[in-house]
């Protein structure tokens, strides 16, 4: 293989995974932790199972903004505080460069198929659980 792995024109589907919960709902999330993984995100994906998503993990809480260039699926981004609380949600249209930003500094952003949160009645203030949101010792 030549060149960086992330320079391909295909989806990244081999990232580590984590199981998160939103109430009784399970989420199987790929975990994007490096700048390269985060920049590719869910680009080029043709489809995504109903309870699957991608969680973007940043080093420090900050204002996070996402766009959908080269992303084929309509997604909803949940901007998530360190304790797992959803700060705000943003529906994002495929293949646009509109910026969707967190309402306050966050370390986590969870992207799911558009409508996933709404269908389950999950709004800002709802709490996600999982290993990412457990207090660091």
Image: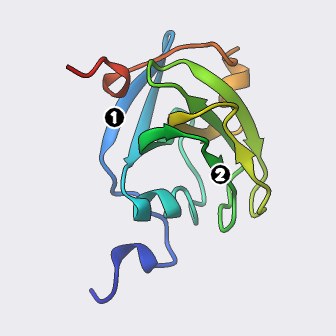
Quarter of the image where the N terminus is located: bottom left
**Residue 98, image quadrant:** bottom right
State the image coordinates of residue 30 (x, y, percent, origin top left): 40, 45
What distance separates the C-alpha of mark 1 from that of mark 2?
21 Å
Tag 2, which secondary structure?
A: strand
Front tag of 1 and 2: 2
Marking on residue 18: 1
Instruction: Decide if residue 39 is on the left or right side of residue 116.
Output: left
Q: Nearer the viewer, residue 30 or 109?
A: 109
Q: How many C-alpha atoms fall within 10 Å of the one at disc 1: few (<14), some, or many (≥20)?
A: some
Quarter of the image where the C terminus is located: top left
In the displayed orientation, state which residue is furthest to the bottom: 2
In the displayed orientation, state which residue is furthest to the top: 23
Instruction: Decide if residue 58 is on the left or right side of residue 96.
Output: left
**Residue 118, image quadrant:** top right
Marking on residue 66: 2
Instruction: Decide if residue 65 is on the left or right side of residue 14.
Output: right
Q: Earlier in the sequence, mark 1 or mark 2?
A: 1
Q: Residue at x 75, y 53 (%)?
A: 99
State the image coordinates of residue 74 (x, y, percent, origin top left): 72, 49
Tag 1, which secondary structure?
A: strand
Q: Residue at x 54, y 37 (%)?
A: 110
State the image coordinates of residue 73 (x, y, percent, origin top left): 68, 53
Q: Nearer the viewer, residue 91 or 74?
A: 91
């Amino acid at each position: 293989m030549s060149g960086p792995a992330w320079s391909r024109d295909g989806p990244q589907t081999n990232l580590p995974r984590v199981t998160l919960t939103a109430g009784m709902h399970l989420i199987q999330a790929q975990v994007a932790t490096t700048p390269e993984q985060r920049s590719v995100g869910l680009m080029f994906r043709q489809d995504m199972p109903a309870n699957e998503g991608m969680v973007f993990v940043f080093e420090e809480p900050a204002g996070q903004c996402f766009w959908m260039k080269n992303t084929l699926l309509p997604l909803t981004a949940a901007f998530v505080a360190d304790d797992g609380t959803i700060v705000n949600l943003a529906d994002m249209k495929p293949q646009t460069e509109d910026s969707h930003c967190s309402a306050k500094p966050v370390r986590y952003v969870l992207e799911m198929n558009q409508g996933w949160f709404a269908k389950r009645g999950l709004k800002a203030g709802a709490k996600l659980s999982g290993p990412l949101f457990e207090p660091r010792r």
